[in-house]
Amino acid sequence: MAAPWIEKLEGIDRRAVFLVMGLAITLPLLYPVPLPINPTQPVKDFHRFIENLPLGSKVLVSDDWDPGSKAELQTVSLIVHRHLRDRGVRVIDTCLWQTGPAAVADVLDRIYGKAGKVYGEDYLFLGFKEGRELVMPSLGNSIPATYPADARGTPIGQFPIMQGVRRLSDLAGLISISAGYPGTKEWVQQVQKRYSIPMVSACSGVSAPEYFAYYESKQLQGLVGGMKAFAEYEKLLGGKTGFATLAMTSQAAGHYMLVLLILLGNVLYLLKREMRTWALALALASILLYAYTLYAVSAASGGAP
Amino acid sequence: MNGVLALMMKLILQIFFTLAVFSFLYRDNPIYRLAEHVFVGVAAGYGIVVQFHTVFMPNLVRPLRDEGVRALLLHRQFHLGALLLVIPGILGFMIFLKFVSNYAWLARWPMAVVIGYYSGAAIIGSAQGDLIPQIQANVLPIVRAGAWGRFIGSPGIFTFLDVLYNPILIIGTFCCLIYFFFSKEHTGVTGGAAAVGIWFLMISFGASYGSTVMTRVSLFLERAYFLLKETTMLPGSVQVANWKVTAVVLALLVGFLVAHRIKTGPEKA
Amino acid sequence: MQSTMFALLAFFISSAAFRAFRIRSTHAVLLGVTALVVILGSVPVGEAVWGQFPTLVAWVMNCLQTAGKRSILIGAALGAIATGMKMIVGAERGYLARD
């Protein structure tokens, strides 16, 4: 029979957990701490892919996300389009998620429109098309047949950017910014091998572990997955600190709070099962980990990310 | 003035609905229900409009009308491709016959076309994009090129893990595939390999869980950033700090919820 | 609203983790330890604690967990091909829901 305090703590109102988690994520937003961010290899490969695109070349960017995944994907979409714009690469953009076009159009306007880029010459938004993965091989066969008009209803043959572009193989590469289905997996399956198109992916954290298999098999030449990877990418680009970098403190606090909850739950579980030695060992290990983490963070926060 | 009012209303509505959805964390309440219903209605309506303007009109109606029917009737030009669009048009209409009980069976024909199309795409995509490349990528040398040299040159945990890189990929993938082979009982050598396969699957699920946590935290983080840190630019270079509007809307929401709680009483256990 | 609906998941995942994430067996240990390594490795703090932590996380993501994911991809591809063939030849007619 477990002690009453163990039962009480284990059965604590979930709203207390919500409050603790909410505070853990929100407070660091108000008091951010600079953390060291060093780019990893998949992010460097993604960055190199865009750096190696010739000036004036054309790529297809598939912004397959919607406001539900805006937190991550709008962040990385802004970063990727900024990089493409600064490299002088011309972008043909699509969106295969029904509620995504408005958010994607906003990104394009912020990056290209406000920088004086010309719509139809430097960038083009084809908009949404129903069909999910069937749109992809259709684009591989003929882009004008799939998208007779752009997102605004203008026939795409009128745009200078579409000169010499009939199908996917006429483009220098494919960049998939993906929140789920349809997204990177479907692009790899339907298009990457069939049309031998170089491809990279920027995706949400949920999808990243699966896409590592594609990165490892070289079907993807670069992979940026999750908020930390976005922060690494921002660091590679330099310039003004973006949202991903600013978010790292809160992200870290949220993660450590969640790990603390898992460890606490397991300590209570071990105590309930009368495995006191194990519970004590786990509790001590957790305290040491957190104490050392706080010390390491305060030592590291003197340097800028 | 109109622009300022419109943008302020937009900001207030964004913050109101965000806080309304977050109010569910406390308990189910009418404000959350309102937000939920508005969301469902707006999403459905928006979806229909997007489909109409981006799919129905440019891919069916305009080509059929302009390049097909009008060209034939007015200019005596026969464009077979455009006129054949009447077939998918009719098939699309037949799906709606699902709602008419006497003719609901007709909806199976367009469904069969769609299923056939997706099946074909799935076969090719799976074979070309997943099966063959992933098997090819797993045909690896036992030890990565240069890994032994690096380990001998500077022995350490990570140079050792580098030596294990290829064997783990090969053995792990193979054992997981043996686990998925249910036509043979998992006993003896097969059972041992399947057990190893489960370990690797647990590791991959753990990695998925960890990455899922990252995404979920990011989602809330962005909303919190919008509510507390972002500023909104109004016409006339006026900047409004979102947190001020959040504080006012939050106070009103909390007031309403308290009044609602007093009226309805404590929640039932 | 859509992004806020999904943002609620951060709280539900933390509540579920506190109540249900119990390391009871060998499999749970493997899952739990990998999850903890990836969760802590998904933020820069891990690197501040141990400089080599990102290398460990990269090895886990590129090698250890890829083995499982690759087998799932191969298995799912075989399943999709088999199911697709069955549908095309008419052996699978579940999609023709009986009225």
Image (cartoon, coloured by chain):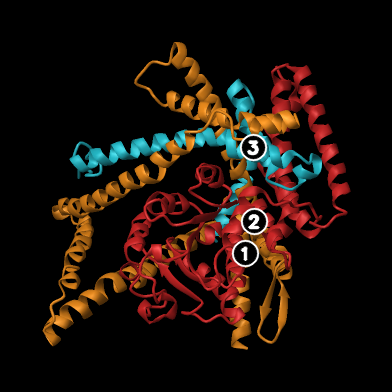
Is residue A259 rendered to the left or right of residue B196? right
* Residue in view at x 25 percent, y 44 percent: C95
- Chain of the residue where label 1 is placed in the rendered structure: A
Look at chain A in the picture and name its colour: red
Q: Depth check: B169 or A227 in front?
A: B169
Q: Nearer the viewer, residue A262 or B176?
A: B176
Q: Quadrant of residue A209?
A: top right
Identify the secondary structure beneath mark 3: helix
Instruction: Tell me: residue B23, above or below residue B186.
Output: below
Which chain is orange in the picture?
B
| Up/down of A275 relative to A156, above or below | above
Residue A79, numbered label: 1
Q: CA distance from mark 1 to mark 3?
A: 26 Å
Front residue (pair B264, A267)? A267
Q: Circles 1 and 2: CB distance less than 8 Å? A: yes
Name the quadrant of the N terminus of chain A. top right
Can you see residue C2? no
Q: Which residue is mark 3?
A: C59
- Label 3 marks which chain's residue? C
> Tell me, what hue is chain C?
cyan
- Name the residue rendered at 67%, 64% in the picture: B226
* Mark-to-mark CA distance, 2 and 3: 19 Å
Answer yes or no: is residue C24 visible. Answer: yes
Kind of residue indicated by mark 1: Ile
- The numbered dot on residue B180 is none
Residue that mark 2 sits on = A230
In this rendering, position of residue A64 left or right of residue A117? left
